[in-house]
Image (cartoon, rainbow, N blue to C red):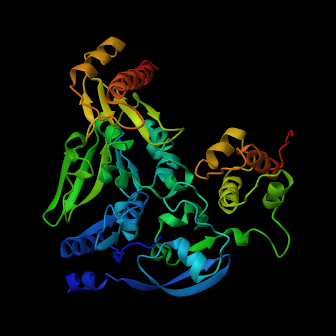
C-alpha cells in the first residue's frame, strides 16, 4: 500500500530527535512501527514527519540495579525483553510480552511504543500501572517522571505531549505479579485484561474497560474482595462486536480475580 | 547550527543500500515506501507476497538482520544498511532447501500464497530451535495465516525438516 507522503529523519541523539519534533508540529516518533505504520496505511494518522528513534543509543538497554530496580529503554523490543536475563528480575514482564501478537510483531514492537500508543486494548499499560512503574518523559524543558497511572490520559493520549518523548521506564523490585486476559484468539487483541501486583498492597489494573487502565486496590487478595473492588470502581466498559458492555464488566471481575490469584500464589512461594 | 542540521535531516526520498540474499542493491526510494514494495517492485523479488497489507497475515515475512519481520510493517528506509533474506534465498541453485522439500513432501501447501512467509518463519524458528515441539512450531507460525491447509501439514513439514519423526 502507498502511504501518504511523509518526511523521515533518523537522528543519532535524543537532543536531535527532540529538535526535529520541535520543528515539526505534525511530527511523530516512530519506534517499532507495528502500530503506527498500520495506522498510517488506514489514514487514521497522517504525520508530516516520522522521527525514527532506532538510532538513539540512550533509548535502548535494560539495566538491573543492586536494589532490584529495573530500567528499561523504551526502544527495547518485546523479544529483547523476553530474552533478557536482567528483566527476569520482574518475571511478569517477559511473560506478558510473550503474549503479544506474534513472533514478527514481537521482534519489532517496542515497550515504549506499546505504552505511548495508549491503545486501551494494549497489554502493557495496565501492567505498568499495576506494578507501579515510573515513566520518564523528556522534552525541550528537561525531564520529569510520572507514575504510570498518571501517564495514560486517554485513548491514544499520554502525558508525553507534543515535542516530548518517553525516555525511560523504571520498574521497582518485586516478583509477586499476575496477568490474565480474555483475548480474541491465542495472543490476540484483548477483550478484557487485568494485571495484578501483590508486593505489599494489592494493586489491580484493568485494561480494555475504559480509555485508560483502571487502578483498583482490593482490601485483600480474596476473590470476593477483588470482585467487590472491581464492582465499586464504577467502570463503564464499551460494548462491541466481541463483547457487550455487560459481558466485559463480568469478564473484568473474572480476569481481576485470576490475575490476583497468580500474584498471591507467587507471594506465598 | 545543530538545529539546522536536524532540520536538514528530514527527507522525503533517500538513497538506501540493502543486501538481499547476498546481493547488494542501492536504490533511491520515497520515504513512504514500504519494504515489501522495495523487495517486490524495485528488486523484482516477487516471492515475498502481499497478503493482507495490514500486518496480520505474514505472507510478506522476511528475515532482516537475522530477525523475522513482516515487510509490510516497515518502511524501506528503515532497512537501510540491512541484510535481508527472502524466500528466493532458501534454495541453492535448483536444489530446494530441506525445509522446502519437506513442505512439498508433506503437502504443506495448497494455493501456496502463504508459503513464502511460512518458510521464512520456519527458517527463523529452526535456526533458534533445531528440535521444536509441535507447540513451539505453532507458536512460531502464529503470525502466518494459511486458509487452505488447516496448518497440520505445515506443522508436520517443519517437524520433518527438523529431523523429527512425523506420523502421517
Q: Does B96 appear above or below B162?
A: below
Q: Does B8 appear above or below A187?
A: below
Residue A46 lies, in percent from the top left, at 30, 68
Q: Could you tell me if residue A237 is visible in this image?
A: yes
Seen at 36% across and 42% down, the residue is: A121
Q: Nearer the viewer, residue A86 or A46?
A: A46
Q: Could you tell me if residue A90 is visible in this image?
A: no
Q: How many marks?
A: 0
Residue A62 lies, in percent from the top left, at 41, 52
Seen at 55% across and 87% down, the residue is: B26
Q: Residue furthest left?
A: A141
Q: Does A35 appear above or below A132?
A: below
- In terms of image quadrants, where is residue A194? top left
- In terms of image quadrants, where is residue A3? bottom left
Residue B92 lies, in percent from the top left, at 81, 73
Report the side of B1 relative to A60 (left or right). Answer: left
Q: Nearer the viewer, residue A164 or A176?
A: A164
Seen at 85% across and 42% down, the residue is: B166
Q: Nearer the viewer, residue A198 or B149?
A: B149
Report the side of A41 relative to A231 (left or right). Answer: right
Amino acid at each position: 500500500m502507498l502511504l501518504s507522503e511523509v518526511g523521515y529523519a533518523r537522528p543519532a541523539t535524543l537532543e536531535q530527535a527532540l529538535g526535529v519534533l520541535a520543528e515539526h508540529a505534525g511530527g511523530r516518533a516512530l519506534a517499532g512501527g507495528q502500530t503506527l505504520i498500520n495506522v498510517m496505511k488506514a489514514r487514521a494518522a497522517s504525520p508530516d514527519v516520522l522521527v525514527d528513534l532506532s538510532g538513539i543509543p540512550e533509548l535502548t538497554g535494560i539495566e538491573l540495579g543492586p536494589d532490584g530496580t529495573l530500567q528499561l529503554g523504551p526502544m527495547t523490543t518485546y523479544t529483547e525483553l523476553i530474552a533478557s536475563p536482567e528483566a527476569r528480575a520482574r518475571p511478569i514482564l517477559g511473560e506478558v510480552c510473550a503474549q503479544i501478537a506474534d513472533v514478527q510483531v514481537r521482534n519489532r514492537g517496542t515497550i515504549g511504543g506499546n505504552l505511548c500508543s495508549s491503545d486501551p486494548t494494549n497489554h502493557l499499560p495496565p501492567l505498568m500501572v499495576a506494578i507501579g512503574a515510573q515513566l520518564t518523559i523528556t522534552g525541550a524543558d528537561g525531564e520529569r517522571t510520572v507514575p504510570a497511572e498518571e501517564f495514560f490520559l486517554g485513548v491514544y493520549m499520554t502525558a508525553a505531549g507534543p515535542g516530548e518523548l518517553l525516555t525511560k521506564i523504571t520498574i521497582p523490585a518485586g516478583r509477586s505479579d499476575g496477568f490474565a486476559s480474555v483475548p480474541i484468539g491465542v495472543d490476540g487483541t484483548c477483550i478484557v485484561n487485568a494485571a495484578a501486583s501483590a508486593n505489599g498492597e494489592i494493586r489491580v489494573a484493568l485494561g480494555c474497560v475504559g480509555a485508560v487502565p483502571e487502578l483498583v486496590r482490593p482490601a485483600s487478595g480474596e476473590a470476593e474482595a477483588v470482585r467487590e473492588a472491581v464492582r465499586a470502581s464504577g467502570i463503564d466498559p464499551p460494548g462491541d462486536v466481541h463483547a457487550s458492555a455487560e459481558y466485559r464488566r463480568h469478564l473484568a471481575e473474572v480476569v481481576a480475580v485470576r490475575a490476583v490469584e497468580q500474584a498471591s500464589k507467587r507471594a506465598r512461594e | 547550527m545543530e538545529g539546522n542540521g536536524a532540520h536538514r535531516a528530514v527527507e522525503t526520498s533517500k538513497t538506501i543500500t540493502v543486501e538481499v540474499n547476498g546481493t547488494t542493491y542501492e536504490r533511491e526510494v520515497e520515504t513512504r515506501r514500504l519494504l515489501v514494495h522495495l523487495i517486490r517492485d524495485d528488486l523484482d523479488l516477487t516471492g515475498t507476497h502481499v497478503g493482507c497489507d495490514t500486518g496480520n497475515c505474514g505472507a510478506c515475512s522476511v528475515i532482516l538482520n537475522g530477525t523475522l519481520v513482516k515487510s509490510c510493517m516497515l518502511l524501506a528506509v528503515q532497512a537501510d544498511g540491512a541484510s535481508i533474506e527472502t524466500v528466493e534465498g532458501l534454495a541453492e541453485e535448483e536444489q530446494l532447501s530441506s525445509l522446502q522439500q519437506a513442505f512439498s513432501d508433506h503437502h504443506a501447501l495448497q494455493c501456496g500464497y502463504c508459503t513464502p512467509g511460512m518458510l521464512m518463519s520456519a527458517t527463523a524458528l529452526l535456526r533458534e530451535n533445531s528440535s521444536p515441539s509441535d507447540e513451539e512450531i505453532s507458536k512460531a507460525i502464529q503470525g502466518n495465516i494459511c486458509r487452505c491447509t488447516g496448518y497440520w501439514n505445515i506443522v508436520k513439514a517443519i517437524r520433518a525438516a527438523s529431523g523429527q519423526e512425523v506420523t502421517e
